[in-house]
Image (spheres, grey):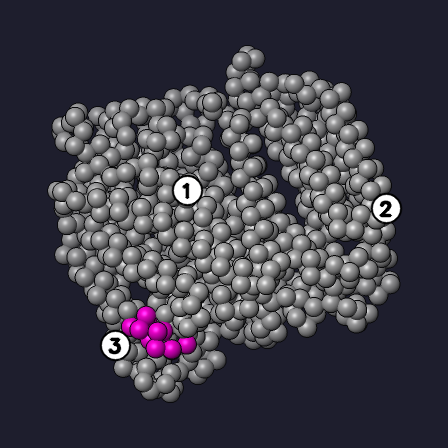
Amino acid sequence: MDESQNTLSTGRSPAMTYGRYLLVWIGLVALTSLTVALAGIHLGRWVILTALTIASIKSTMVLFTFMHLRSEDRTFRVFVLVAVVTLGIFIVLTFFDYAFY
Amino acid sequence: MAETNPAVENTSPGFYTEPGRHRGVAGWILSTDHKRIGLLYFGAILIFFLTAVSLGFLMRLELLTHGKTIVEPQTYNVMFTLHGIIMVFLFIIPGMPAVFGNFMLPLLIGAKDVFFPRLNLLSWWFFIIGGLLALISVFLPGGAADTGWTFYVPYSVRTSTNVIPALMAALILGFSSILTGLNFITTIHRMRAPGMDWFKMPLFVWSLYATAWIQVLATPIIGITLLLVAIERWFGVGIFDPARGGDPVLYQHLFWIYSHPAVYIMILPGMGIVSEILPVFARRTIFGYKYIAYSSLAIAGVGSLVWAHHMFTVGMSNTGMFIFSLLTFLVAIPSAIKIFNWIATLYKGSIVMDPALLFVLSFIVQFSIGGFTGLMLGALAVNIHVQDTYFVVGHFHYVMFGGAGFAMFGAMHYWFPKMFGRMYARKPAYLSWFLTTIGFNTLYFPFLVLGYMGMPRRYYDSLPEFQPLHTISTIGSWILVLGIIVMVVNLLVSIRRGARAPANPWGGKTLEWQVSSPPPAENFHTIPVVTHGPYDYGSHEPSVAEAR
Amino acid sequence: MNLQPLVVPGDSHAHRDDIGSRMGMWLFLFTELILFGGMFILYAVYRFSHFQEFQLAAKQLDTTVGTVNTLILLTSSLTVALSIVALREGRKGFSKALVAMTLVLALAFLMNKYFEWNHKFDAGIYPGSPDLLSQPDGVILYFGLYFVMTGLHALHVIIGAGVLGYMYWAIGQGIVRPDATVRLEAGGLYWHLVDIIWIFLFPLFYLLQ
C-alpha cells in the first residue's frame, strides 16, 4: 500500500512524535501541580471555577493531542463540540430549577 | 434518480436464499445482513406489540364497569406498568429505526450494509435479552414492578416488587438503542453512494440521522439514572431517596432528560416515513425538502431542551417553569413546518388512495391533534389542571400511537413488497385502515374529555359521572383491536400467498425501488451513481420508472 | 472536505475505512461521557444545595492519594499514545512494552483505589452504614456520589485494561499491525476517555478544601 493510500485510509498525516507527546505529558503534570497548589488557597466561591477551568484545559490537551482530534477530519471536532454542548445544556437547564425561586 | 440495473429480476427470492456463513435458524439469528436483522426485529417487535395491546385491551375491559370488572387493583397497577414498559422500550423506541431503518437505510443510500454489521447483530441480541428480562420479571417472586414505567422514586426504591429486573431490562435495551444510533450515524457519514451529497439523501435517512443523535446522546442518561436507582435499592446509597438526603425531583429531571428526547426517537422516523410515502402517492416532489430535513435536526435539538414540562406540578422554581414552557412552545414550530410542507405536497397532486397513503393521512390528522394537546399541556396554567389526568394519556397516545404507530402501519404496507417480495391483499388493508382509524379515535378522544373533566390517570376505578365516556372508549378499543387483527392477519397471510411483487410497484424514485423485491443479499450488484434528488416527480427528464 | 473511503466496486469486504472505525469509537465515547455526565449533574446540584456539608465531607479524603492516582493515569495515557507511534514505526516489541506499562499503571491505580476504599470502610464509611446515615444529608450524598462515581470509573479502568490486554495479545498475533493500527487507536481512545473522566473527578472530590 503506497503512502497516499495509507493516508487516505487512516485519514491522518503522521505529525505526532515521541517528543511531542512527552511535552504534552509534562504540561499535564504541571497543570495538575497547579490545581493542587491552588486548592490550598482560600478561594471561596472561585474554587470550583478554577478547578473546572484547569480540568477543561487538561482535557482539551488530551483530546487534541493524545486523541488526535487536531489531525482528524473537522467532522470529529464538530461531533465533540455537539456532545460537550449537549451535556452543558443539560446541566444549565437543570440549574434553572435549583438556582432560582 | 439513478442508473437502473437492467438485470433486475422480479421473481428472484433475493436475500432469503443467500444466508451467508450459517444455514437454517443460525442463518437468521447469527446473520449480519441488515435485511435479516431488520426482519428479526420485525418479528420480535410484533410479538411485543401484540402483548402490550392485549394488556391495554384488558385495562380497558377493567374500566368498562364501575368497581371490579376483571382484576384486582394491584394487578391493574402491574398491567399499566408493563403496558408502558413494553410499548415504550420494546415497541415504539426501537420500532421504526430497528425494523425499517435497518432494512432500508443501506438501500436508500446505495450501500451494501451498515458500517458495523456485527454490532448491528449485537444490538438485536441485546434487544431480545432485554425484552425477555422484562417479561421474566413478571413471573419472579414478588411480581412485576408496579411503579409505572417511569419508576419514580421514592416508591421505586421502597416497593418490594421486581423493580431491579425491569431496570436492568431497560438498561440493556438502552444499550441496544445506542449501538443502533452509533451504527446509523457512521453509516450515513461514510457509506453514501457516489454523488449522493447530504441534500440528495431521502428524507427518511435525514430523520434516521437526527434520531440516531438522540439515541447516542440522550440514552446514556437514562442508563445511569436507572442504574443509580438499582444501586440505591441494592446498597442503600443515598442518591434520590429523601430519607437519605436525596432529592426525588432530581430523579425526575434525569429521567425526563432522556425520556422526553425519547419521544422524538419515536416520532422522527415516523415523520420521515410520511415524507417518503407522500410524494409517491401524490405523484409530486415533496414540498420544501430542505426545510423538512432541517426541521428533523431542529426537532432533535430543541426537543432536548424541554424535558421539565413533565414536571410542572412537582414544585420547580417559577423561573424553571417559565423557561421550559417557552421552550416547549418553540419545539412545535419545526413540527408544524413539516405538516405545512406535507399538505403542500398533497395540494394539486395526483393522489392515489393507497392504504399506505391512508395511514399517512390518519397520521397527519391524529398527530396534529396530539400536537395541539401537547401545546395545551405546555401552557402552565392549563397544565396545573390536567397534569396526571387522562388528558395527558390522550395526548401521548395521539402522538405516539396515532402518530408514530400509524406511520409504522403505513411503512409496513409501503415497504411490504420490497421486504417480502409479495403484494398484500388490498381490501383487507383498506378495512384494517378504516377499523383502526375509527377505533383509535373512539378510544382516545374521550380521554381528552375525561381528563379535562378531572379523571386521574393510572386509576383502577373512577367516579360514576366518568363512566359513559369510559364505556365509549372501551368499545373503541374493541374496534381498534379488530382492525389490528385484520391488519396483522392480512400481512402475515400475504407473505405466503400474496402475488409476486415487481421491483417498483408504486413508482417510487428512491434507490430501494431500483433493486429486485426482495433485494439480493448484497443489495446492489454495482454501487449506483446518484445524479438527481430523491423525489423527482414532474421534473423535466422522464423518470426511469415512467419511461418503462 | 470529507475523505472518502477506498471503495473497490463489487467487493464489499475489500475496502477499509479507518476514519469510519474511529468515528464509531468516538460516538461510543460520547455515550460514556454522558453516562458520567449524568452523575456530574447530580454532583453539581447536590454540591450547590449542600455546599458546607460537601466541604466538610471532603476533608476525609486523602489529597495525596488522589494526586498520585491522577499522575498515574496521565502517564498511562502517555504510554498508550506512544505505543501507537512505536507500532507505526514497526517496533512491535517496544509497542507491546508500552502497552504493558499502561496495564501496570492501571493496576497501580486500582490498588490505590482498593486501599482507599478499604480505609473508608474501616472507618465506618460505606453506603448504607449507620455511621454515614447519622451524618448530615450533604455528607451522605457526598459519599454516595464518591463511591458510585469512583466505583463506576474503576469499573471502566478494568474494562479499558481488558481492552488493552487484548491489544497486547493482538499485536503479538499480527492482528494489529504497523499498517493496520486502528484497533489499537480505538483502544487508546477509550483509555484516554477514562483518563479525562478522572481529570474531572479528581478536583471535584479531592480538592474541595
Q: Chain of mark 1?
A: B
What's the mark number on residue B472?
Answer: 3
Residue under label 1: B297
What's the mark number on residue A40?
Answer: 2
Q: Are marks 1 and 2 on the same chain?
A: no
Q: Are marks 3 and 1 on the same chain?
A: yes
Under mark 3, the amino acid is Ile
Under mark 1, the amino acid is Leu
Residue at position x 56%, y 51% in the image: A90
Q: Is residue B452 within the magenta segment?
A: yes
Answer yes or no: is residue C127 visible.
no
**Label 1: element kind:** helix
Q: Residues within 10 Å of mark 2 (few under 14, many from 20)?
A: few
Q: Residues within 10 Å of mark 1 (few under 14, many from 20)?
A: many
**Label 3: element kind:** helix
Q: CA distance from mark 3 to mark 1?
A: 39 Å
x%, y% of residue B473?
28, 74
Indicate left or right for B458 with B16 as reference. Answer: right
Residue at position x 43%, y 75% in the image: B458
* Residue B158 or residue B449, whichever sits in front: B449
Residue at position x 40%, y 68% in the image: B382
Q: CA distance from mark 3 to mark 2?
A: 71 Å
Residue at position x 86%, y 62% in the image: C122
User: Are the residues at dot 1 and dot 2 in contact (C-beta closer than 8 Å)?
Assistant: no
User: Are the residues at dot 3 and dot 2 in contact (C-beta closer than 8 Å)?
Assistant: no
* Span of residues in magenta: B446-456
Under mark 2, the amino acid is Gly
